[in-house]
Image (cartoon, rainbow, N blue to C red):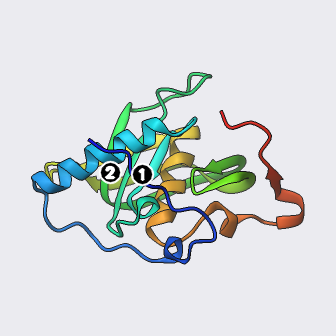
Amino acid sequence: MAILEILTYPDARLKQESQPVENFDDELRAFLADLEQTMLAGPGGVGIAAPQVGRFQRIVIVDCSRTRKPVPNHGRLFIINPEITAWEGMASGREGCMSVPDYTGNVIRAEKISLHYYDPQGTPQQLDAEGYEARAIQHEIDHLDGLLFLDRLVSRRNDLFRRKVYQ
């Protein structure tokens, strides 16, 4: 396994849209292991998307089981070709990103989501998520469409903050 280089803002490749995964093979699973190692090596990372390491396929990993304050979660999720099928409620919350290491920002996202995706073996899955986990999944899926949390700020003047400590 390897720790991959994370692209950081303003790298133009972060704006690129990702393509669906078509082959669920050993090469994919080896990449997932590297992506997981990269997420775990980052400070405070609860998620990572393949475009953040320069692979433009619809792949994300989310794991909210390691947060300092316990939150409802499904453990470590390997989410491939995700599609959010339902949203409920909206809430503002602070987000950070390994690709935007010097800032955090307030972003409005759905409080509950339903999601279709594939696991690393290519088996279709369904998931309902809420709260912090739903926010993390939405944040990572945005990377697949070339969006950063910076693109979702209501106001760069009032909702963007210089990070004091990376936790």
Height in image: 44 above or below 121?
A: above
Q: Residue at x 71, y 46 (%)?
A: 93
The amino acid beneath tag 1 is Ser
> Is residue 95 rendered to the left or right of residue 44?
right
Question: Who comes first in sequence, dot 2 or dot 1?
Answer: 2
Q: Residue at x 82, y 52 (%)?
A: 161
- The spot of residue 85 in percent (x, y) is 40, 61
Q: Quadrant of the N terminus?
A: top left
Give SS at disc 1.
strand
Give SS at disc 2.
strand
> Is residue 141 rendered to the left or right of residue 26?
right
Q: Residues within 10 Å of mark 2 (few under 14, many from 20)?
A: many
> Is residue 6 rendered to the left or right of residue 92?
left
| Mark toward the viewer: 2 or 1 | 2
Q: Residue at x 71, y 56 (%)?
A: 107
Q: Which residue is mark 1?
A: 114
- The spot of residue 92 in percent (x, y) is 73, 50
Q: Which residue is mark 2?
A: 79
| Residue 161 visible | yes
